[in-house]
Each structure stands twice: as structure tokens, then as C-alpha cells.
Image (cartoon, grey):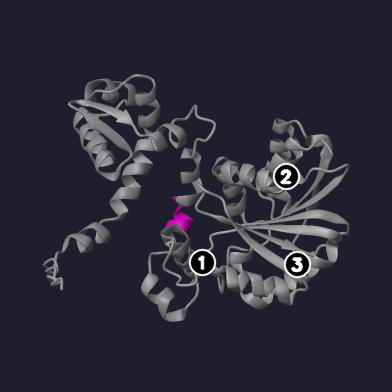
Amino acid sequence: MAVKIPVPSPPPSPSLFFETINAFQSSAVLKAAIELELFTAISDGAQTVGDLARRCQASERGVRVLCDYLVVLGFLTKDQQRYGLTTDSATFLVRTSPAYLGDTTGFLCSPDAMATYDDLTEVVRQGRQLEESHITPENPLWVQFARSMGGFMMLPAELIAARLGAAQGPKCKVLDIAAGHGIFGLIIARQNPNAEIVALDWPAVLEVAKENAAKFGVAARHRTMAGSAFEVDFGAGYDVVLLTNFLHHFDVPTCEQLLRKVHAALASNGRVATLEFVPNEDRVSPPVAAKFALIMLGGTPAGDAYTFSELKSMFQNAGFSRSELHALDPSPQSLVLSYR
């Protein structure tokens, strides 16, 4: 009979405390590197501290410390005294890359976004955001979001279009609710010459979607609908309704109210494509989706990161026949496809 030898537990360590309490430094380091265009400089061949300092117009001491910190974080590699890019950094942080994400700092690191956590203790006490909701008509925050986050949404937009088969058909009518930058509908329009997109959002935000429609070369099949998704008349006969990064702003009754309206606007065989950060039922995995609930706690009156069972129940209560959960790897978000 084998004897199981107990494995001693590691001694207590303050490392996690220090790493977490100082985590704000990591976001500051990444933001500074993006603003200095450090990753682009390395991509262009500047790999030593001296070369990078000259290219970024910064001190050698500052660049050395910044680069070493980025190595520790996993954004850079280091061989002797030369720095290199990881695959992720080359893909997402070099300005000339089509998947460049550096512009997202304009929204994710904006004063409004950062202020959410100035008094998180009181947010937790009250169970909601402390300031007036940013989900208000003509809030300039959403124009900033539309201009900053379009690149970040290219990957999930491509993956959703692929899952939908780019909504191929002799005719495809798509409603893009809270369209923002419009990327999700525009990808479908670019892949399917039969697709017609109706983008719904506030008027100022829709100007960004119009600009992108022109860049994508699909402006002739892209029209806009201004106003609140809860108030405007959608019309009817849509083959696909896009609900991307929207439901998490609201509580369950409000979501179901909207979904009943969406259900009525769909064609008989219509589908809803919902993009969300969807945590597992344990609510602590996967990490990115699980952590998203905190953003909703501090940034909305009653929003949340909903599990698939919660989303499925919302759609069922609104009259939908079934819903499916699809991973969108390598995106941290998930797609819920719901059928009328």
C-alpha cells in the first residue's frame, strides 16, 4: 500500500499584497510606453536603451526602467542589452499593425474611467456607481468610446461575422443596436454584398459610424437611426440584430424589456448576436470575464457581467426559442446566439 507523503504548504508571503496594491503602476507603465510609441520604435529596429531613448525623445534612465518593467510584465523580451517584442506586443501595440490597440487608452484610461475607483469602498457599500449614470443622451464619453475602441473590436467583429456566416443570403437586414463605431455591422456589410445595416445610437456617436462606413466602402448600404434603443421604433423584418457590449449596462428587468422589443423586430427566422464578457457559473473564472463585473459595479446603476444561464433566461423570458454560447478565442468575450 502506497503511503501518501503530505506536501508542506508554502509559508505565508506578502508578495501578492505588494503586487496588487501597486498594480496601478502596471497600467501607468503600459500607457507611458504607448504614448512614447516604444513598441513601434522597437519594431522599427531601435532595440538598445540608447537607440530607444533617442527615438522616443526620453532619458536613457527612464527608458531602461520602463523597458525592464515591461519585460517583467511580459510585454517585452530582453537578450543581453537588447529589447524585443512578444507576439502579442507586435500584434496589438505597434502602431502600424492593423490590430493596434493603443488608441483604447483614450477611453480605458480616461479621467472618467479612472474616477470610478476613487472611492470603491463607498461603491461597494451602496452597490452601484456614485455619480450620475453615463448612459445619458449625448454624453461625449460615448463619442470618445467610438473613436477609441473600434480597433479593439475588430477581432470579435470578424469572429462574429464568421459565426454568422457573414449573414449570407439574397438579402440580409441587420440592426446594430448601440452601434458606436459601427464595426460589428460594417464587417458584415463588407463580407456580404447583400447586407444592409441600420446603426442605432445617439446622433453624435453615429457620426463616427458614418465615417467608418465610408472607410469600409459600404456607406451606400449603411443608414443610421438616432435615439435611445428603449424609445425609437426599430421597424421589423431584421434577419440579424447585433447587441454588442450593451446588456451589461442594465439590470435583468430592463434587459428583458429591450429583448421583447428586439424579438418583435426580428423576421421569423431572425437571430440576435449578443457579445458580452460571460463569466462561468462560479463567477470567478475565466479571469477577464469575471473581473468585468467590477467595472459594471462602479460604472452603472445596476449592470453586471451576466453568466450564460442568466442571459439564456432573459432571452427565454422575452420569447426567444433557444440560445447558444460560443467562445470567440482568442477574444476574452463570448457570443450568445439567440433564435426567435
CA–CA distance in space, label 3 to label 1: 20 Å
State which tag comes first along the sequence, 3 or 1. 3
Nearest to viewer (mark 3 / mark 2): 2
Task: Please tell me whether residue 79 is drawn above or below residue 255 in the rendered image.
Answer: above
Residue 8: x %, y % from top left: 11, 69
State which tag comes first along the sequence, 2 or 1. 2
Residue 78: x %, y % from top left: 23, 31
Look at the image and tell me in which quarter the C terminus lies.
Answer: bottom right
- Residue that badge 3 annotates: 230
- Helix, strand or loop at label 3? It is loop
Q: Judge whether residue 70 is colored magenta.
A: no
CA–CA distance in space, label 2 to label 1: 31 Å
Residue closest to the eye, 123 or 8: 8
Region of the chain picked out in magenta, as a range: 109-114
The amino acid type found where label 2 is placed reads: Gly
- Residue that badge 1 annotates: 296
